[in-house]
Image (cartoon, rainbow, N blue to C red):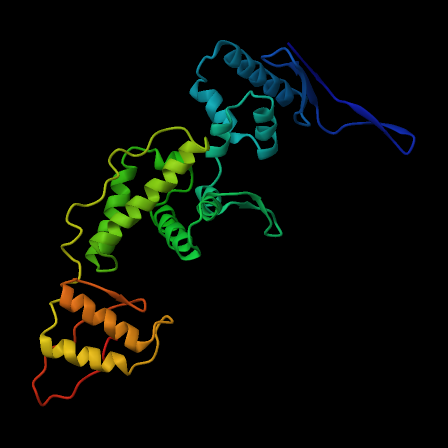
Amino acid sequence: MYRVFKPTYTKNGERRESRNFNIAFRDHLNRRQTIVALPDERRSIAFADKLQRLIEARQTSAALPLEMRNWIDRLDESTRERLVRVDLIDPTSAASDRPLLEHLNGRQDEKGELLVPGYRQALIARGNTQKHVDVTTQRVRTILTECGFALWRDVMKPGAANVVHVHLGGLREKKKIGGQSFNYYIRDFRGFLNWMIEEKRAAGSLLPNLKPVKNAEVDSIRRRALLVDEMRWLVAVTQKSKARQNVPGPDRAILYRFAFETGSKKVRGGGRSVRPPPARSAGAKRGRAYC
């Protein structure tokens, strides 16, 4: 049972009545609780009836009907958090009603102070580099915003995986991303969804149809092997070039020669891939080297 009433208080020696009705009740563990309702008595009583149904559902572990779930979705944030604290609402349901971008970047107050860490902060705490964190969260943000996923329920709708595939496929068709990048987007988005579930911020399972493409190498850049004369020219130019990414030219020249003579397909020299210069005639003027 419950009691709907307006509490009174004293201010400047004058007895006053609160603007909103309060609801006093005993929860599913028989604890006394009080919650602020509404200024209107009739609506406050209807609110108390809904609370009573929540209590009965918690006592019997019964599933809430759609009507009650919709009512919970319409509750203001402070009331929802209050019901979470007294264990009348599953915290997973409450968290899943927050914007996904908030889960991604963390919840902040009006001054920009971090209140609740998000996926970005979790990646940083795992020891990932700032560049990795920025790239990963940017990929997730792109899918959320460009596929119209504002809330968790949007991700769980039928056909959500197909929306992601179609969008990324369109970017690949326009040559904005390649097959490998397509798979990176899928990997990072699945990582975010998995984190949401592991952190009990949402209920459900990873989208079973959200899979990478199998022909990722089809549109990748293919580079031919350097000819012996081209390699001699590259080593000679690199030895005289300036440092890149704190790696001096002579050191990079040794790496390039080592990769060529041992048959390595690719070597990172100062943060840049070694690309062979285009084949030219003996009298042609050399262009700028990738060294």
Q: Is residue 193 above or below residue 131?
A: above
Q: Image quarter for residue 289?
A: bottom left
On screen, residue 78 versus residue 69, left or right, reads right
Q: Residue sitting at 13 percent across and 78 percent down?
A: 230
Q: Residue sitting at 32 percent across and 69 percent down?
A: 270
Residue 58 at x, y = what percent? 52, 14
Q: Is residue 67 above or below residue 157?
A: above
Asked if residue 274 can be seen in this view, the reply is no
Q: Residue sitting at 37 percent across and 51 percent down?
A: 136
Residue 121 at x, y = what percent? 49, 46
Q: Residue sitting at 14 percent across and 49 percent down?
A: 215
On screen, residue 89 versus residue 6, left or right, reads left
Residue 276 at x, y = what percent? 16, 73
Q: Nearer the viewer, residue 38 or 107?
A: 107
- Residue furthest to the right in view is 13
Q: Is residue 46 above or below residue 187?
A: above
Q: Nearer the viewer, residue 161 or 212?
A: 212
Q: Nearer the viewer, residue 95 or 25?
A: 95
**Quarter in which the C terminus is drawn:** bottom left
